[in-house]
Image: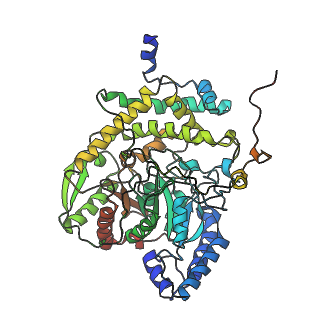
Amino acid sequence: MTDFSNLTIHEASKLIQSKTLKALELTEACIGRAKKLNQQLNSFITICEEEAINRAKKVDKLIANGQKMNPLAGIPIGIKDLFSTKDIRTTAGSKLLENYVPVYDATSVYSLNNANVCIVGKTNLDAWAHGSSGENSDFGPTRNPHDLSRVPGGSSSGSAVSVSSGSSLAAMGTDTGGSIRLPASFCNVVGLKPTYGRVSRYGVIAMASSLDCIGHITKTVYDNALVLNVTAGEDGFDSTCTAQKSDDYTKDIEKSVKGLKIGIPKEYFENFDWKIKNLILEAVKKLEKLGAKIEDISLPHTEYGVATYYIIQPSEVSSNLARYDGIRFGKTREQFGSEAKRRIILGTYTLSSGYYDAYYLKAMKVRRLIRNDFVDVFKKVDVIICPVSPTLPFKLGEKVSDPLQMYLADIFTVTASLTGVPSLAVPCGFIGDLPVGMQIIGPDFSEKLLYQVGYAYEQETNWYKKTPKI
Amino acid sequence: MKKNSKLKTQASSVIDIDYVSKLANLPLSNKERVLFEKQLKDVLTYISKLNEIDTDSIEPIGHITNLQNVLREDKPAPSLSQDDALKNAPKTYNGFFEVDAIFEEQ
């Protein structure tokens, strides 16, 4: 069998639509790889062989009939097991939902199905998307394909690993405090957290509703734009989803970064691994060489990000998880794992009578200050570049018994979540065999600009071509 | 009363786990109680750093997108069938969800 594991969507789509490659061949190859690697990597909870094969056959037939198709037609993709998929088991990574089969599709899944993607399977995750390592899954941890003794990052762990290991060409994820950007960075793939309200959240199991964003992971920046073209847009089923028109995100992606102002926030470059810091600064230099202007900036409330986030998020988690009572679907509340229980207790406490003002309201005020920092900075610069993670992918088990240390893995990602602005995580090199990623953050609804910057950098470096040896 | 409400707006560093688990309708084992109390104490200490900031004159974030009054036309549209809605329910009765009795008969 030919090895398709390094194909990008951009390449595969051209081959499929020109009838050089059958969607069926590509899908069978990805399913085969997913099955083979799953024993090692555990990136899928459910593999949807039959559904994917049927879809691929349909695509090949339509193309043979000369039908014009979306570039995603026939492309094998993974879906985080937090997205409702009609007639396909959806577990949220928790035993509580191990037998739950949704009767409807999430809006983003519906849109992807309309574009005729082939869903390879439902990817593993930290249960209920609670976690930064992928270890909180009731279906076992996912492993990093670049080093099997290390975590892939979470909570969209299986999504990042399935793309990184060539079992899918893209995968959907959710990002509430870094859950797409962190695993993307740990696995050398591209991950987008769009602007809050850009992509419908309908049908995705809710974690923290004022923060949850639906995004995706791909090998390249261009591929990432192709997926957003399908998922972005208004949805009558999600009132937080904006009516503001979405773009063609691939259009002008080759535009030069000449004259663009890039801000380097000093608070994101203090006190952490100097090797990671140097790699990010090298990437910034590369963009400077391409004509971008670099400016030092300050986001003074950065140090309060994690504290603010760990009030707002568990509060909203406790409210969203209140619906799991074992009456309409799922098992009873004893079945929640430790992390969900911990967050329910913390969130119930911070929302309880007499404490609301001291915690939730206080955090929503600090959230305003953090947002104001970003709004002010974007009057001076076009985008911000900063690290995704203060550390390299850590060893499995290293942080499981210390929740606070695990929470601090999100230190550089929670601020974009709290402020609602979009952030693109792009690979920017390796330390030894371990990948490092950087964030390109822009103002509300600036995804197109983020793709232009990411694309310009990727053309220079092509880090995505360095695939794991598995 | 006034004194009491003042007290309650101060962040505490210990959670009354028994009380909160009852509020959350979340049964916990003894082991979990002990573990969570210790771990959440660390988290509460960490989040108390927000008290360093004076926020008296700051308007809290209501909704990050500033969207307001998103309404649709009040018209019925296709929805889940009764059968579909009940499909995942562990116990049903005559096309309804079945729940344990809430009020005991005297």
Residue B29 image position (x, y, % from top left): 68, 32
Q: Which of A365 and A391 is in front in this view?
A: A365
Whether residue A150 is visible to the viewer of this picture, yes or no, is no
**Figure coloring:** rainbow
Residue A43, located in which quarter of the rendered image?
A: bottom right
Residue A112 image position (x, y, % from top left): 52, 67
Where, quadrant-wise, is the N terminus of chain A in this rendering? bottom right
Q: Which of A309 and A367 is in front in this view?
A: A367
In percent of the image, x 45 and y 16: which residue is there? Answer: B5
Residue A306 image position (x, y, % from top left): 40, 40
Q: Nearer the viewer, residue A196 or A158?
A: A196
Horizontal side, residue A172 vs residue A463: left or right: right
Q: How many labels does the image show?
A: 0
Residue A367, located in which quarter of the rendered image?
A: top left
Where, quadrant-wise, is the C terminus of chain A in this rendering? bottom right
Horizontal side, residue A379 vs residue A323: left or right: left
Horizontal side, residue A414 vs residue A54: left or right: left
